[in-house]
Image (tube, coloured by chain):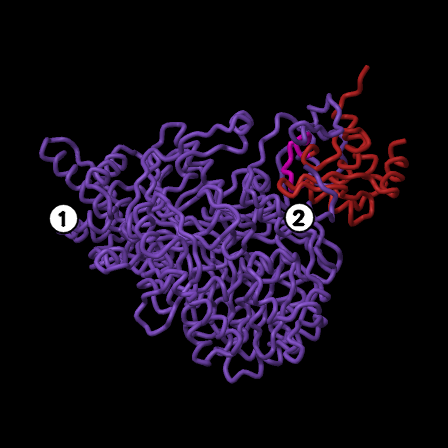
Amino acid sequence: MRPDPEEAFLAATEALGRLRPDLSPLAAGLLAGLHLRIATDTRALARALALAHAHVLRALSELEEAGLAAATGRDARTQRTRYAASPEGRSLIEAALA
Amino acid sequence: MDHPVGSPQSAAGRADRGQVEPAEAGPVRVEAGKRSSAAGGWGALKSCGKHLLGSRAPLSGARAMLKANQPDGFDCPGCAWGDPEHGSSFEFCENGVKAVSWEATDKRTPPAFFAAHSVTELRGWSDHALEGQGRLTHPMRYDAASDRYLAVTWEEAFAEIGATLRSLDHPDQAEFYTSGRASNEAAYLYQLFARHFGTNNFPDCSNMCHEASGVALQAAIGVGKGTVLLEDFEKADAIFVVGQNPGTNHPRMLGDLRRAAQRGARVVVLNPVRERGLERFADPQNTVEMLRGASAPVASHYYQPRLGGDMAVFRGIAKAIFAADDAALREGRPSVLDRAFLARHTAGYEAYRALVEATEWETILDQSGLARAEIETAAEVYLGAERAICTWAMGVTQHRHSVATIREMANVMFLRGHIGRPGAGLCPVRGHSNVQGDRTVGINERPPAALLDALERTFGFAAPRRPGHNVVAAINAMLDGSAKAFIGLGGNFARATPDSARVARALAGCRLTVHIATKLNHSHLVPGTVGYLLPCLGRTEIDRNKAGKTQIVTVEDSMSMVHGSGGINKAASKALRSEIAIIAGMAAATVGSDKVDWAGLSDDYDRIRTLIERTIPGFTGYNVRVRRPRGFMLRNLAAERVFETETGKAGFAAEALPELTEHQQARRAPDTFVLQTFRSHDQYNTTIYGLDDRYRGVYGERRVLFAHPDDLAEIRARLGGRVDIVGLHQDGVVRVAEDFRLVPFEMPRGSLAGYYPELNVLVPLSSFGKGSDTPTSKSVLVTLRARAVAAA
């Protein structure tokens, strides 16, 4: 039986948050979204979560400052920003979700 | 199309084309033909998002706790229009996108840039080229010997600024300018600094835009602000849009106008220039419409009065209303006026009615430039509306008789009680995103005694009671040498102001100039004897205190809604400080920290908000309420039909129409025109995002002069295709703007229009609005001369 998407996402987010309690829930959710292939850019994640794009951009900035993710491209017109986990981010995802 | 972060293509340049982002069909779509790597089956996640924003509590059982909560929203710096879903709108609005991209540029202007370019050389660059260099990164001090800005430490900068300010003979020798982009917290701290220092000299950008609205509304309804909420636009039957161009200046307003039009409301536009955005509008959130290139009408009635003719139009509307009222009473029908409102809530009605009836149609028609039938049709729309709103902007406020015009518009709205009830009211639409909030928290050269009393009680210093300088007074003081220091909290003072060439010389003559800025502009290139350029965080950047905690600031929109805003991007440079930290640093170095804990306030903006709550009415529970979705509305008594005027009632003004507007003067003199300045579509006040003005069909240039096709043909036949514009103000000052290309446009004959700041050299400092001191940028008398002749 296919797992409930919401439960899977929340569980992954919570697992990441347990290892890095300094992260905001949305920043942890962004990493969880990468792992679960929900989205790889800020605007897509914002739409998936029905949030303002600004909030997701802020969460990405938080992950960049923490060295867990990096922006890989940005659309100047929309500010849609593509991102990827850094090696540290991948390690965190592995540790939390493997 | 994506570009790697850091690549030249990723900068804001492509946004300059002004394309609107098509809305997307689903969460996974990126651009036409592109898809992200998102997988399907995640639709249920929409319920998770808001919870993730809500708290750091465990997510288990989240579904039971899901509720909307958006702390630390993001306020779009693009304009001051209200935002129904706070934080989400910037990406759906051209202005928002441009403003955010402009700050988020990857380009930098580090000390090495200044080492490579002298200030004299940079003065030869255009506004667009200067700002195109990107974000300032380090505090810089002007070195006259090398004619270059050199990097300094923050501590060195604060120490010398403080010492120089203290060396002045009197605090009134300093001018503290504020741009309307400054947050409530920065503005409050700034006024606290200046008043602790000992002056009320607060020239601010509202002096150049909506000052007339504040003055007129204060007299008419007891508060210098509008009375409507965003929700009122959903209920109005008629909306009068006067002297404004929302398509370029506050595009989100077009969405509200369009929705009103679609549900049957009449939208009556009064604008001398035929602005395409007011005729039809494509909603960027409507996917089908955007993809098909479709649009929907906005204005049901579009009238083009002569420049400065709005007061005459409203006088004519009033005349038609009174005629309809007389007819109704004659025929035994009820009065068309709200006589209960007039009797209970207004003063001066009889005198106004007598004045209206004494005003001849001939005078009204000559001054307004409209046909009587047009004015009477506008009056019919007004009479057919149960709920009406009147909005306006710079097209109304930048004339000699702006205060009288706004009073006239208010008079007409009073006649049927269109104030203080749902779907009705007065709405001056501000430009800068916090220009209204800055005034609310004390940026005022004539502060109310209650504010000064509260500051004295709270902080224990003697607040200055002398009125200070507005923009015009500040410039005159710098020109005559009585002001010797200029501190600029944002903005581009030398380019935004009238007689900009003279203002530049005035700045250069100061003993001290300090500019707090994000990007380089021309005001920075006329440093005083001691000149500092202090780079600050932008609204879009995350602001952390010493402990690493993110801080929010707050702003007030045109509907008096106060809401919080936190940054969304990393700081452009580690050396940047927030505006608040910079103000606190200067203040501590100037007045000391005995009475105000500047460092503590700078480290916790909640503490600043607590002080605002303590000293300014309306902010009770500030720190709690501002963290609620959409924030809170500052109580506006006029919106509750409580009018804190001298009579305790809404006041009719009975002022005769101007004897001759500039347009009437121009028509009576040979080879004379009246010029208005306005923004291009790729422009935000003095910030030039790009060189296009797509709604008006101009691309890649800014030195253009719009004229009626018949006028243009005559000018071309006489002078050729390129002209110099020569000011005709009779004060002995020679004013010339050189080398403009003529462009035909739908506007009244005898009128010209072009872009500021390039044309600000023609706006006379000595011509300003009666009662407001607002420069008359919408009615400048000029003549033209052939470019070839001038060149020879």
Specify the amino acid type for callout 2.
Ala
Instruction: Name the residue located 53 percent from the left edge and 78 percent from the top edge.
Output: B510
Mark sitting earlier along the chain (1/2)? 2
Q: Colour of chain A?
A: red
For this rendering, which residue is in front, B731 or B417? B731
Name the residue that disc number 2 marks. Answer: B11
For this rendering, which residue is in front, B456 or B416? B416
Magenta residues?
Answer: A46-55
What chain is colored purple? B
Q: Which residue extends farthest front? A: B792
Left or right position of B497 against B138: left
- Residue B207 lies in quadrant: bottom left
- Residue B279 lies in quadrant: top left
Instruction: Name the residue located 47 percent from the left edge and 47 percent from the top edge.
Output: B249
Instruction: Name the residue located 60 percent from the left edge and 54 percent from the top edge.
Output: B553
Specify the amino acid type for callout 1.
Glu
Callout 2 environment at 10 Å: few (<14), some (14 to 19), or many (20+)?
many
| Image location (x, y in percent) of residue B284 | 53, 33
Q: Which residue extends farthest left? A: B330
Q: Which residue extends farthest top? A: A1
